[in-house]
Each structure stands twice: as structure tokens, then as C-alpha cells.
Amino acid sequence: MPDEFEDRAREALAQPKNVGEMEDADSVGTVGSPDCGDMLRMWLKFTEKDGKKIIDRASFQAFGCQTAIAVASMATELLKGKTMDEARNLKPNELSGDLGPLPPMKIHCGQLVEQALKSALDGKDAPAKPATETLAGNLQPSSSGKIKIVPLDDDHDS
């Protein structure tokens, strides 16, 4: 029988909120690793309120496990109305919102969302990447022509 976390995650996945590119975003952050396949891009749109930058809207695109998608959906809802400082100080377990505490094997999903948020908050005033570039495009290996070989220890566990 599924636990409460799995039920809440399933509900969040059934109707994720704020999915997709935001063309009028003020900032964008992309994090992840093509090696493991988890990647997340977060867009932020700001407004001015009482002389402070406030997050008006947030959206995301994710390649990864269902928990990362559920946490990103919750986080984009939670971010609305937060100042940049308030958003920057949110911890991964806070970003998971109504999902509640993440199971130990899913903590990295909250960290992925936190890193994407911080990347967007630290970004420039406009998306650094052309609007035509997709998150999937970031999974392609670089064409620099350089290969780095890193030997593994004999006792390395995969």
C-alpha cells in the first residue's frame, strides 16, 4: 500500500502546475547532470512591490524522476509573492510544499529544484540561452573535441 508521500506525489504529478517555458521570463536557471539524466530548468518573472523585486510567476521544465517534477510543481506555486531573499533562503524540504518531507532517497530531487532556483536568482536579467534552445538540447555532449578520461579505483562501486 502506498504511503502518504507517494499519494501526494501522485496527485501533484496528475496535474503539475507551471510546466513549460516562460517566454517573458526575467531570469532562467538550469541545473542537472547529463550523466544521470536529471535536469531542471526554472524560469522566473519578477514584479516590483514596495521597492522590492517580487516573484510574480515561476515555471519549470524537467527531465528526471517523478519526484523532481512534483517538487518543482510545488515550488513554483510556493515562490509566488516571495522576495528574492525569501526565495534564496528556502531549503529543499520547504520547496516540497504539501508533499511534506522527502524520503531519504529523494532528497536530491529537492536539492535539484533548490539549485535551479538559486541559478535563476543569480542569473542575468534576461535568459542567457536563446528561446529556441530546449532543455533536451543540453543533454547532447559538447562538441569541443576534447575527451577527458578519468580512471576509476578498483574498489569503485557503480
Image (spheres, rainbow, N blue to C red):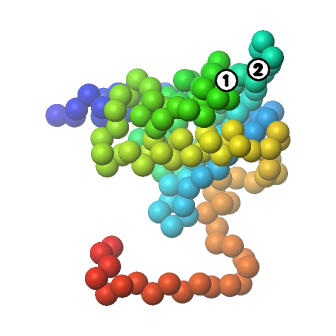
* Quarter location, residue 46: top right
Image quarter where the N terminus lies is: top left
Numbered disc 1: secondary structure: loop
**Which residue is rendered at x = 64% and y = 33% of the image?**
59
Pointer 1 residue:
83
> Is disc 2 surrounded by few (<14), some (14 to 19) or many (20+) residues within 10 Å?
few
| Residue at far left of view | 1
Image quarter where the C terminus lies is: bottom left
Looking at the picture, tell me which residue is in the foreground, 91 or 1. 91
Picture coordinates of residue 15 (x, y %)?
49, 27
**Which residue is rendered at x = 41% and y = 41% of the image?**
67
**Which residue is rendered at x = 61% and y = 39% of the image?**
117
- Amino acid type at circle 1 is Thr
**Which residue is rendered at x = 48% and y = 35% of the image?**
91
Looking at the picture, tell me which residue is in the foreground, 28 or 143. 28
Q: Is residue 20 above or below residue 84?
A: below
Disc 1, disc 2: CB below 8 Å?
Answer: yes
Query: Is residue 1 toward the left or the right of residue 127 in the image?
Result: left
Looking at the picture, tell me which residue is in the foreground, 86 or 60. 86
Query: Counting residues from the N terminus, which is met first, the one under dot 1 or under dot 2?
Result: 2
Picture coordinates of residue 142 (x, y %)?
69, 73
Query: Is residue 113 toward the left or the right of residue 24 in the image?
Result: left
Picture coordinates of residue 66 (x, y %)?
42, 43
Numbered disc 2: secondary structure: strand
Pointer 2 residue:
52
Query: Is residue 24 toward the left or the right of residue 158 in the image?
Result: right
Looking at the picture, tell me which residue is in the foreground, 138 or 106. 106
